Amino acid sequence: MPVSVFDLFSIGIGPSSSHTVGPMRAGRAFASRLAGTPVASVAVDLYGSLASTGQGHGTLGAVVAGLMGSDPETVDPDAMGASLAELEDTGRLRLAGGATVPFRLTDIVLHPLTMLPRHPNAMRLRATDASRAVLAEETYYSIGGGFITNDSEGDVAEAAIPVDDAVPFPFSSGAELLAACAANGLPVSGIALANETATRSTEDVRAGLLRIHDVMESCVERSVARSGTLPGGLTVRRRAANWFEQLTADDPEHDPLFAMEWVNLMAMAVNEENATGGRVVTAPTNGAAGIIPAVLYYALTYVPTVTAEHRDDTVLRFLLTAGAVGSIYKERASISGAEVGCQGEVGSAASMAAAGLAEVLGGTPEQVENAAEIAMEHNLGLTCDPIGGLVQIPCIERNAIAANKAINAARMALRGDGVHHVSLDQVVETMRQTGADMSTKYKETAMGGLAVNVPLC
């Protein structure tokens, strides 16, 4: 069953979909179960990657904001910060269900060396009454891209296409997707659109995707208006504002010779905003959120056939195609850095972006599949080793590099006829196996790689 494009591209806040968006959703889901119960206390335990890099990824504040009732799509990042500051001052947490209990962020217990069996991103929430009797207890897993599961209910992320709803063209592999395209004479975006309209109108799909693109563009606009350094203690300088000023002066007419520099800027602008905890589109994760907006910007700016009247249709085709490919990664492997390393985040996003661009460039379904395969093939083995547990180094620059890889992959695929030795399914399976073999220290734990070889001061 394909995952909906509206699940892969969800609106949330930074800096991490698995460490911020997922935990907020889990906290909100747990708090909703407590309405009307005599809650006297709550306990939060974080395990594995959520514990080891949770401080830098905003996990502690996110799960508490969820307990307060915040939703990643609608929460105001500034208001959330104020609420957390008030919590630290008063030591009183007002749950979404209405009860107020004693709590501070320092009450959250971290277990960085304990990996629960189902997934390395795990959190256990417990509520008790005045006699310390357990009212509710649940273990949630943040499995990448903001998706969450738990031990008792399974998938508790609200799916845009429920799994029990039939879609006209079910697929879970590249081969099945290509077969559906061939049998029905449709491009990849056409298959994806038909599946989306199984549960909503064409107008709603169109409006929803254009809104997602608007949020992507707004993210860039906010970022290029900011200066100074990123939060978190590394004193990483924000570069997007300065680069934007320079490029606007050096290239006012958007000469194609400057295309790579604009793509770099767009990707880095999104990820600087993400690192600030601002509003971004999870695409398919926050750590890789800059790649698809940057490559889509390239498509809208530098592809000659994309005129003003075709702009909206181009956005739709690009995102639908990218979503179809992302669905395969989500179903057959993983998009979680804590599970398979950064190949699952930046690699998946590059593959999705390459597919979207290949379709916009006029590629056949076979060429689109080839573009997606090329992009992932050359991101295999990519580790997730953020310095200081922050989504800054190497994440921000890595998005820019991967965006240009995606463009190159699409253009390479368009020079061929779609026939190639390595299939998308084979490279997805290779990515999954590589992630399983990868040492835990390279999977979003900040215990290896750059995270231990680069001093924090």
Image (cartoon, rainbow, N blue to C red):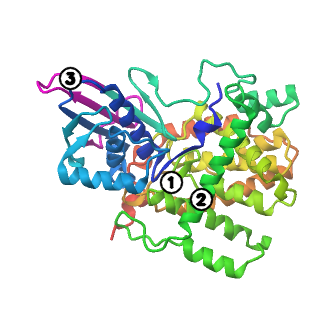
First in sequence, mark 1 or 2: give its number. Answer: 2
First in sequence, mark 1 or 3: give its number. Answer: 3
Q: Amino acid at mark 1?
A: Arg
Q: In the picture shown, does residue 456 fall above or below 27?
A: below
First in sequence, mark 3 or 2: give its number. Answer: 3
Q: In the picture shown, does residue 454 fall above or below 249?
A: above
Side of 436 relative to 402 (left or right): left
Image disc number at residue 279: 1
Quarter of the view holding residue 133: top left
Residue 52 visible in the displayed image:
no
| 107 or 385, nearer to the observer | 107
Residue 421 placement (x, y as % from top left): 78, 40
Residue 108 placement (x, y as % from top left): 24, 43
For label 2, the crowd category at 10 Å Cα-Cα, with few meaning under 14, some 14 to 19 and many 20 or more, is: some
Side of 118 relative to 114 (left or right): right
Q: Which residues are magenta?
A: 108-137
Quarter of the view holding residue 136: top left
Side of 322 relative to 95 (left or right): right
Q: CA distance from mark 1 to mark 3?
A: 36 Å
- State yes or no: residue 44 in magenta: no
Q: Amino acid at mark 2?
A: Ser
Total marks drawn?
3
Side of 429 relative to 136 (left or right): right
Image disc number at residue 327: none
For label 1, the crowd category at 10 Å Cα-Cα, with few meaning under 14, some 14 to 19 and many 20 or more, is: many
Q: Which residue is mark 3?
A: 134
Quarter of the view holding residue 293: bottom right
Disc 1 + disc 2, Cβ < 8 Å? yes
Residue ID at (49%, 57%)? 274
Residue ID at (81%, 49%)? 360
